Image: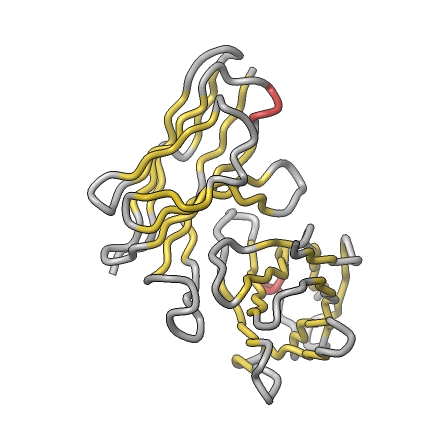
Amino acid sequence: AQKITQTQPGMFVQEKEAVTLDCTYDTSDPSYGLFWYKQPSSGEMIFLIYQGSYDQQNATEGRYSLNFQKARKSANLVISASQLGDSAMYFCAMRAEYGNKLVFGAGTILRVKS
Amino acid sequence: GAGVSQSPSNKVTEKGKDVELRCDPISGHTALYWYRQSLGQGLEFLIYFQGNSAPDKSGLPSDRFSAERTGGSVSTLTIQRTQQEDSAVYLCASSQGLAGAGRYNEQFFGPGTRLTVL
């Protein structure tokens, strides 16, 4: 079975600072994918970044980067230069390489302060 | 192009009534998923369709829940004899194809249906 753990229920960050959102996972699948989604107060789920378990380099997408430590089974999201619009709920999720469903963590609420 | 759409956006019903929630996936997406998000919680998988078939129904919480998909497109999630614990946001997502097909096989989510059972 797959499990995602997000231990930070809520985080604050000052505008323009960087912030790291933690995610650890557990799986017995040899190959899998890790995802981060953003959910603003409007409720939509916005895909941010993807990391494959066999990817050699950490994923980056603009201000988002994923600190992937396979041995530690962690996939932390780093947001650089935080903006007020980054205030939202953030979910870490995983999917087995040949699976289908996403397994989500409980989420972290991020609040960016001006 | 158009994203995933869901209707209604909000549904208030009385305990014991049946409800139907609709999802229109992105055109051409063969995979469709239903998730449930209870207040302050993460998303919980309900069911997965590939075409009109549902190879994974493992997340449906009880036999009061059922779903179908027709024409490889629209899907309907039906909850019979609703209970207060069914109150949640029901999210639908679609993706291009088979799991593992492509690096991302990213799931695109709809805006959700907020169900309130009184």
Residue at image location 57% in from the left, 75% down from the top:
A51
Who's the residue at 62% across and 24% down the image? Answer: B85
Q: Is residue B71 left or right of residue A72?
A: left
Seen in the image, is B90 located left or right of residue B21?
A: right
Give the image quarter of residue A94. Answer: bottom right
Percent x, y for residue A53? 60, 76
Seen from the viewer's position, the closer of residues B93 and A28 is: A28
In depth, the one of B94 and A11 nearer the eye is B94
| Percent coordinates x, y for residue A77 in the rendering | 66, 72
Specify how the rendered protein is coloured: secondary structure
Describe residue A84's horizontal placement relative to residue A23 as left or right. left
Q: Considering depth in this image, is B58 or B20 the residue closer to the camera?
A: B58
Give the x, y percent position of residue A104.
62, 54
The quarter of the displayed image where residue A7 is located? bottom right
- Residue under the image location 24 percent in, 47 percent down: B72
Q: Is A92 on the left-hand or right-hand side of B18?
A: right
Q: Residue at x 47, y 57 (%)?
A: A100
Quarter residue A86 falls in: bottom right
Q: Position of residue B48 (x, y in %)?
A: 42, 46
Q: What is the tally of numbered marks visible in this picture?
A: 0
For the C terminus of chain B, which image quadrant?
top right
- Quadrant in the picture for the N terminus of chain B: bottom left
| Of residues B49 and A51, the one drawn nearer to the viewer in this rendering | B49
